[in-house]
Image (cartoon, rainbow, N blue to C red):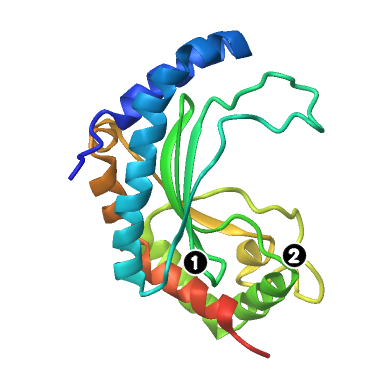
């Protein structure tokens, strides 16, 4: 089985070079390098970790390798290529396991980047009640990193001083683990360890999103 020891350093080297030469001619010349040291190892990692996640969670995972081509339709920045590698494994319940590599970060995460309307209603109802206490406890125990909430204020009808105010201000939630240098040389093992540590949070979140009125 592949150990993926060179995936992160090779990807970082490629994206650092791409950032200095973000044009189609350069990428066309370097595409074999991209496919050899980034795309194919990433696809193998998708398969390997996807099988492990399916076994661990009991839920089928849909793997996704995000395209390197940028969507330029509504962007003032017309550079054609993304300078990061993003992988995702998602299940039918709306939860995702994520992995990102860029010159600015190397991290793994679990959660939902953004809730749809139904999930957002369930999220707010869940975290405002007893399930919110459980989720908050799991977040504390997991010792991961959270991005800042999307909202400045707690949405109505919840009180601004609600004990779960930080969670109510969120329109999605992902718990992140930043890979250190040693972990970047063994990303498969590092992600397995992080996802295992985040499992209780993941299951609490899944229960909230699956709740019925």
Front in this rendered view, residue 42 or 169: 42
The residue depicted at 46 percent of the width and 13 percent of the height is 30
Measuring from the top left, give residue 176's x and y in whole percent.
45, 50
Disc 2: CA contacts within 10 A as few (<14), some (14-19) or many (>=20): some
The residue depicted at 65 percent of the width and 58 percent of the height is 114
Measuring from the top left, give residue 98's x and y in whole percent.
46, 50
The residue depicted at 54 percent of the width and 15 percent of the height is 27
**Residue hosting label 1:** 91
Give the answer, above or below, for where 126 lies relative to 179.
Answer: below
Measuring from the top left, give residue 26's x and y in whole percent.
55, 9
Q: Is residue 17 left or right of residue 148?
A: left
So how many labels did they put on this image? 2
User: Helix or strand or loop: what does disc 1 sit on?
Assistant: loop
Q: Is residue 212 left or right of residue 27?
A: right
Image quarter where the N terminus lies is: top left
Give the answer, above or below, for where 159 lies relative to 88.
Answer: below
Q: Is residue 130 visible?
A: yes
User: Helix or strand or loop: what does disc 2 sit on?
Assistant: loop
Image quarter where the C terminus lies is: bottom right
Q: Is residue 197 visible?
A: no
> Farthest residue in the left direction?
1
Front in this rendered view, residue 58 or 168: 58
Residue 180 image-quadrant placement: top left
Q: Is residue 124 left or right of residue 199?
A: right
Front in this rendered view, residue 58 or 201: 58
Give the answer, above or below, for where 59 lies relative to 7.
Answer: below
**Residue hosting label 2:** 154
| Earlier sequence position, callout 2 versus callout 1 | 1
Measuring from the top left, give residue 22's x and y in whole percent.
60, 13
Mark 2–mark 1 Cα distance, whole angstroms, equals 29 Å
**Circle 2 or circle 1, nearest the eye:** 1
């Amino acid at each position: 089985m592949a150990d993926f020891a060179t995936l992160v350093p090779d990807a970082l080297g490629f994206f650092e070079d791409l950032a200095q030469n973000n044009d189609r001619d350069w990428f066309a010349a370097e595409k074999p390098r991209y496919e050899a040291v980034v795309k194919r190892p990433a696809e193998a990692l998708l398969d390997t970790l996807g099988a492990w996640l399916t076994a661990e969670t009991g839920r089928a995972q849909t793997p996704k390798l995000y395209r390197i081509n940028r969507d330029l339709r509504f962007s003032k920045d017309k550079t054609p290529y993304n300078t990061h590698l993003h992988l995702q494994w998602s299940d039918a319940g709306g939860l995702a396991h994520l992995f990102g590599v860029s010159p600015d970060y190397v991290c793994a995460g679990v959660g939902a980047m953004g809730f749809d309307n139904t999930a957002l209603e369930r999220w707010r109802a869940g975290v405002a009640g007893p399930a919110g206490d459980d989720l908050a406890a799991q977040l504390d125990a997991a010792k991961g990193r959270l991005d800042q909430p999307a909202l400045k204020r707690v949405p109505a009808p919840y009180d601004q001083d609600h004990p779960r105010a930080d969670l109510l201000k969120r329109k999605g939630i992902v718990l992140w683990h930043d890979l250190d240098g040693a972990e970047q040389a063994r990303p498969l093992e590092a992600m397995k360890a992080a996802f295992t540590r985040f499992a209780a949070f993941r299951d609490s979140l899944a229960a909230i999103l699956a709740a019925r009125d």
